[in-house]
Image (spheres, coloured by chain):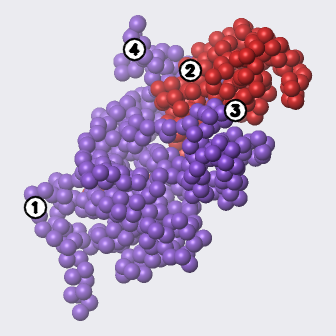
Amino acid sequence: MIKLFKVKEKQREQAENENGKPPVKKQSAGELRLHKDISELNLPKTCSISFPNGKDNLMNFEVTIRPDEGYYTGGTFTFSFSISPMYPHEAPKVKCKTKVYHPNIDLEGNVCLNILREDWKPVLNINTIIYGLYHLFTEPNHEDPLNHDAAAVLRDNPKMFESNVRRAMHGGYVGQTYFTRCM
Amino acid sequence: MADSASQSRSRDLDKLLLRSGNLVGPTFEPGTELRDALNEFVRVLVIGAGGLGCELLKDLAFSGFRNLEVIDMDRIEVTNLNRQFLFRLGDVGKPKAEVAAKRVMERVSGVDIKPHFCRIEDKPISFYNDFHIIVLGLDSVEARSYINSVACSFLEYDSDDNPREESIKPMVDGGTEGFKGHARIIMPGVTPCFECTIWLFPPQVKFPLCTLAETPRTAAHCIEYAHLIKWDEAHSGKTFDPDDPEHMQWVYSEAVKRAELFGIPGVTYSLTQGVVKNIIPAIASTNAIISAACALETLKVVSGCSKTLTNYLTYNGVEGLHTKVTEFVRDKDCLVCGPGVLIELETSVTLKKFIDLLEDHPKLLLTRVSVTYRGKNLYMQAPPVLEEMTRSNLDLPLFELVSKTPRDIVHVTGAAGKGDTKQSCSRKLRVVFKGMDVDMAGGA
Ligand SMILES: [Zn+2]
């Protein structure tokens, strides 16, 4: 290839003389894939999305879920999404910004949803995750606990779990923990 | 005296470069001119000065390359010394790139190695265009993907969608994980690029958070609990930095407490580092074998003295030795290395008109189109919040929206095909504005 390299050298010198403009940075493959995912979002009316950093930063956004059935009906829960340039090779990082009394979401906002970690595959997309999150509110489960106490109450005393959830959503204490109102 | 010394030094190389043979590449022209060009003219960039990078610098220097540069952002740690053989105890804390360059130059006379102690992203894209070939000795998928996109950005296609030879930036990529490794050749536009075969690197398996929180069974579970859950609880808002020894020490001591609570053995500081940074212990011999393959392929690509690997070699030394070469194929629609679809436009065409054109374009038949240009979203057909924010662009000329660039790449997504067979897809378009550029073909 050396001959070719020498040809190229000449051409580049010429090109540099013509315009010294450095090439602009490209979009990563991950950003392009995310662009596709976002442009194809098909959200249920209980979910909405917003882009706090404007229309050109899709790598960080927020999803708000307002469940219309189950224990959490009437509540408003916001999740932050942070997408790596290696998306979809790497799963999005999702945290719940609203403090919630929930067996599968801890008080720091960590979420136990299989497709965010052990079952993430590049064929999945943002829409799948949002549906998965919505599902956590309609069917919280005590088998994958992140909030140990909430999971135990849900398992042993669903009536009490229901009233704890209502109390937390209205703003108040459940045990030692204070929850701000999210109705 | 000097003459005979230099002769003996290039004796083995001469057997490859001065004689013709049956296995040579199509453009091979044996002779001393070729050997001199290799010495004086060819510039090679080595990315990474770690386990593989040290081997590569040494191998390339011994293979007749004299103009090398190396880029690495790391400093030398004690744990590197067993395999990163260019470093000594006294070098701990110094930049890897600088020490590696110095050591090889001390040992191999006539070689010039310029070190760059920085991140690969810190260099302007034009920096990478100055090299004839790029050799990668990296351990991260992300860094490979970045360099791949940079190298592919130099690629240009002619109007028949054939890559222009002189725009191809060859890469040789090596990688090792314990007793396994690979070496591959990427000729953008000819062989598959890193993104064409990204599936070769499956996503890292991650433990479920609830297992970490409730039912830890292994030392790694305890470490990840401290890293992912306990850290946030204790340091609200402060991001964990894996390169900060204090942070790592904190995670380690929390992991030890956790392991004691559950009666789990095996949490050590080095395991903590390994789990948190996702490091698989490196084996010196694997690095040496993969580096040798990469250096030889680099010599073959540059000199044409032999046909190259086609195009992906795997090595497995876990049980006995198994090695195999697989010819992977390009993804013709690859957004990174593919030609994209050539579209010629008048400068007056509005974004709306452009989107309508894509629906009728025989190679595209694209509906529900969204358009993005160099990180700017020109139009998003969904979700409604973005549609509203981008709608006003529809009436503007595309030429204005791309800052009057005569030819450039625009990416679109949408549904391709007709009727029930519609499929969602992303497409790369080479947009050329008529009358603005003598050369109508457009770059990649
Ligand atoms: Zn490709």
Which quarter of the rendered picture does the C terminus of chain A lie within? top right
Local crowd at mark 3 within 10 Å, few (<14), some, or many (≥20)?
Answer: many
Same-chain status of marks 4 and 3: no
Q: Is residue A57 left or right of residue B404?
A: right
**Tag 2: amino acid:** Thr
Check contact, mark 3 vs mark 2: CB within 8 A. no
Residue picked out by circle 1:
B21
The mark closer to the camera, 4 or 2, is 2
For the colour purple, the matching chain is B
Point out residue B304 in the picture as x, y percentages from the top left corner.
22, 59
Point out residue B339 in the picture as x, y percentages from the top left corner.
37, 35
The chain containing the residue under callout 2 comes to: A
Q: Residue at x 49, y 49 (%)?
A: B140
What's the CA distance linking mark 4 and mark 3?
A: 41 Å
What's the CA distance linking mark 1 and mark 2?
A: 57 Å
- The disc placed on residue A128 is 2
What's the CA distance linking mark 4 and mark 2?
A: 24 Å
Same-chain status of marks 3 and 1: no
What's the CA distance linking mark 1 and mark 4?
A: 50 Å
Q: Residue at x 56, y 20 (%)?
A: A128
Point out residue B387 in the picture as x, y percentages from the top left corner.
64, 19
Q: Circle 2 sits in a helix, a strand or a loop, which is it?
A: helix
Task: Tell me the colour chain A is drawn in.
Answer: red
**Tag 3: amino acid:** Asn
What's the CA distance linking mark 3 and mark 2?
A: 18 Å
- Any part of residue B63 in sight: yes
Ligand 1 under 8 Å from disc 3 Cβ = no
Residue picked out by circle 3:
A110
